[in-house]
Amino acid sequence: MTDVATPAVAVDDGRRRWILIATIIGSSMTFIDGTVVNIALPTIGRDLDAGLAAQQWIMLSYSLAVASLYIVAGALGDRYGRWPLFVGGVAGFAVASALAGAAQSTEMLVAARVLQGVAGAMLTTNSLALLRATYAEDSGRAVGLWTAWSGIGTMLGPPLGGLLVQYASWEWIFFINLPGAVLALVLAFAGRSPERLPEHPRPVQVFGSATIAITFGTLTYGLIEGAQAGFGTVLWAFGLSAVGLVLLAVSERRSANPLLPLDLLRSRVFRVANIYTWLVYAALGGATFYLALYLQSAAVGYEPARASLIFLPISLVMFFLAPRFGKLADRDGPRRWLIWAPLVMSVGLLLLTIVTDTNPLLPLPGVLVFALGLAMLVAPITATALKAAPDRYAGLAAGVNTTVSRLGGLMATPLIGVVITLVFASASPHPNADPFATHVVSADQRDATVTAFRAGMGVAVALCVAGSLLAARGLRRDDR
């Protein structure tokens, strides 16, 4: 994705303000949707008779679509304009949300989630690009406002979702996107202005993105379904994933405009930053997914509204502390913070494994420590990945780093699920039962759920420790 050009004509403050608000509302829908769906999964699973594998697909189908199309969506915005891609993404997200709310089966809901991911990729990629094109030299302040208000919207997402699920129905977590989408579209049209496009935009990498979808989609399928039906029955999926990976490597080597230019891959800091991103975001995505299921399982007994409040301190700590750690990393270099951050996160995850009942104080130490580690991490790793890229690849580097973070959660969630399923099956008197069943279960099955959850968190801790070791060995003190 090329650098964003400045608009052809000056844009008055009123129109710029409408675009800013439109992008905040549009992006907030996608941010909120991720956390809300996670909280709602136990209720959705009960209503649609969806077990652990189906619940993973409901969550991961969205991430797979976004990860596969993020870079393509940016290239389409460069070629055809950020405004039409943003507007199309908002409209598509609204339609997909309506279909998700109306879904009567797991298959229908997963299909709607894929459509949400396609639209979400167009929306999120082009929202910031549209801001940069609209505000030009003032884009720094606009992006700061976008980040702050989107963060506030994200903080409100979990408790709002928990209340909707508990006191209305899970369908409303999707229907609530509709009025927001309408308002974002109205404001986007009110703020529309002429846009100058790059003379030589990067080509749309359809084949590369298709191979990403094949590679990671079939790998995810094999991990999820293999844990339930036996890995011997899904060997074809792993084989197809390997074929996709080979095709991706061949197309990258032969393409005149690869998804990952050699100039980027030659940068040691860029390579280390993105492998590190994969490791820690794998831990983050997998841990938060199963924490929401565990808290609402019969082993703990949280209701949706209370479970949603567990995630609120994470957003608050991030909102107030992440910018401070970003400044410290700019001053002292990122190495120190990238070594310690995942270790602090690991301590938080270990503390969360002591939660076995509805005592509201038990999760608090773990959540606060985990949030502190995450606040130490996010700004330094993002800045490191972007600053390691040449200026002409700044937009592409952002797209690659976001894609890698999505792929981390996409791959780790089913991998942790395999560990949880195997440990639960060995410890439970009913090995084929749902590890996170919400109905009344026996004491032995409850203990098996606790043991399986702790094993899953152990995998997330191992990923965090691996990230810390990578930063210690791969980054130097003078890296900026």
Image (spheres, rainbow, N blue to C red):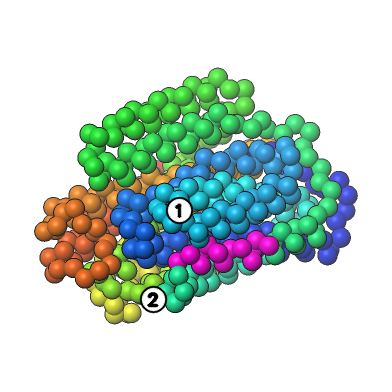
Q: Position of residue 299 (x, y in %)?
A: 23, 69
Badge number at residue 297: none
Q: Is residue 108 above or below residue 441?
A: above
> What stretch of residues is rendered in magenta?
170-182
> For residue 260, what is the image quadrant?
top right
> Which residue is painted at 58% across and 63% down in the image?
177
> Which residue is painted at 36% across and 40% down in the image?
221
Q: Is residue 188 visible?
A: yes
Would you say the residues marked 2 and 1 are in contact, meaning their CB atoms lie under 8 Å apart? no
Q: How many marks?
A: 2
Task: Give the number of the mark in front: 2 or 1.
Answer: 1
Helix, strand or loop for disc 2: helix
The quadrant of the picture occupied by the N terminus is: top right
Rounded to the nearest whole Å, what is the CA distance between mark 2 and mark 1? 25 Å
Closer to the camera, 181 or 220? 181
Amino acid under label 2?
Arg
Residue under label 1: 109
> Which residue is painted at 84% across and 63% down in the image?
13
Q: Is residue 142 visible?
A: no
Closer to the camera, 231 or 44? 44
Q: Position of residue 292 (x, y in %)?
A: 36, 64
Residue under label 2: 306
> Which residue is painted at 80% across and 60% down in the image?
190
Dominant SS of magenta comes to: helix
Nearer the N terminus, badge 2 or badge 1? Answer: 1
Q: Is residue 178 magenta?
A: yes
Closer to the camera, 174 or 71? 174
Amino acid under label 1?
Leu
